[in-house]
Image: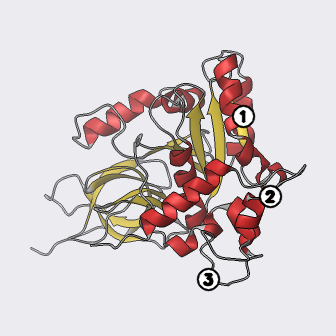
Amino acid sequence: MADQRSALMQGLVVASHGRHCVVETPDGGRRICHPRGKKSQAVVGDHVVWQLPAAGQGDEGTIEKVQERRNLFYRQDEIRTKSFAANLDQILILIAAEPVFSESQLARALIAAEAAGIRPLIALNKSDLTEAFAKAWERLAPYRAMGDGTHYPVLPLALTQPEGADRALLMQHLAGKTTLVLGPSGSGKSTLINLLVPGATVLTGEISQALNSGKHTTTSTALYWVDAQRTTALLDSPGFQEFGLHHIAPTDLPRCMPDIAAHAQHCKFYNCTHLHEPGCGVLEELNKKGPTESLISTNRYKIYSDLFTELSQPKY
């Protein structure tokens, strides 16, 4: 008997685990799907063409094609590549006053966003911890100053406070957009997601069980709709300890760091590494003395030079 398959349909990947994912149809229905054969794995945020199973072939649909992406946000270390999500409007990097955040980790996430052409936002949580928050806010001064304060919006939050002001502040920046929430463990990601999407934790558990992962923690990215009209989406991602940037060439680092890029255009040599060359606009700015303080912080420059060295190592 011939294999009677249904017509091809459009869908949006809203969760994934291994080779399996949950595809949402335009009318809001959801079905577990898998890619046909060894075709490339779809990620959350992908628009796909999929098909219902043939009679007697189980319940899982088959992804036939991943549509062209606007962007893809991912990290890459020496061994593997980890994709977070596709077709994003922006990335909200959530850090906290406590535990003390890693500036290197923050910078790496921002560089990856810049390389992918995705707008980043920074949110600093736990403003109710007055002393710790003041120190953390001061550490973010170089980021708050970039582009005269417009390049990296920095939002102060106290997500455990009941007033509701933080929800309104967040929605000003999130409404009508698809936003990936990224941050280390302890930053308050789950609190933020549940503030904007009540019941998200329960939904995560249901998705995990449906995908047979057996886990109720976030092991992969999942998409949640904030509004009934499905115009505002939040994507929750796994926490991470390291953020590899091996997909970025060392010579591309300056354009991914706005404070470095602003002065790299004044270098004497077109192939300046901004590490030791004469007539380097970045080094001149860094070493500026007098009443006008350098627009490049010492910490930011050290992150740049360390990354340049790391990404210049031979790849085996």
- Residue 288 has which mark? 2
Front residue of 28/151: it is 151
Callout 2–callout 1 Cβ contact below 8 Å:
no
Q: Quadrant of the C terminus?
A: bottom left
Identify the residue under disc 3.
271
Asked if residue 34 is positioned above or below residue 230 in the image, the reply reads: below
- 63 lies left or right of 67: left
What residue is shown at x 28% (from left), y 62% (from top)? 79
Location of residue 225 (image quadrant)? top right
Comes first in the chain, label 1 or label 3: 1
- 249 lies left or right of 2: right
Image position, residue 315 (x, y; %): 32, 72
Q: Three-letter amino acid code at disc 1? A: Glu
- Residue 138 has which mark? 1
Disc 1, SS: helix
Location of residue 66 (image quadrant)? bottom left
Residue 177 is at least partly visible in this image: no
Q: Quadrant of the N terminus?
A: bottom left
Q: CA distance from mark 2 to mark 1?
A: 21 Å
Q: Three-letter amino acid code at disc 3? A: Asn
Q: How many residues crowd mark 3 within 10 Å: few (<14), some (14–19), many (20+)? A: few
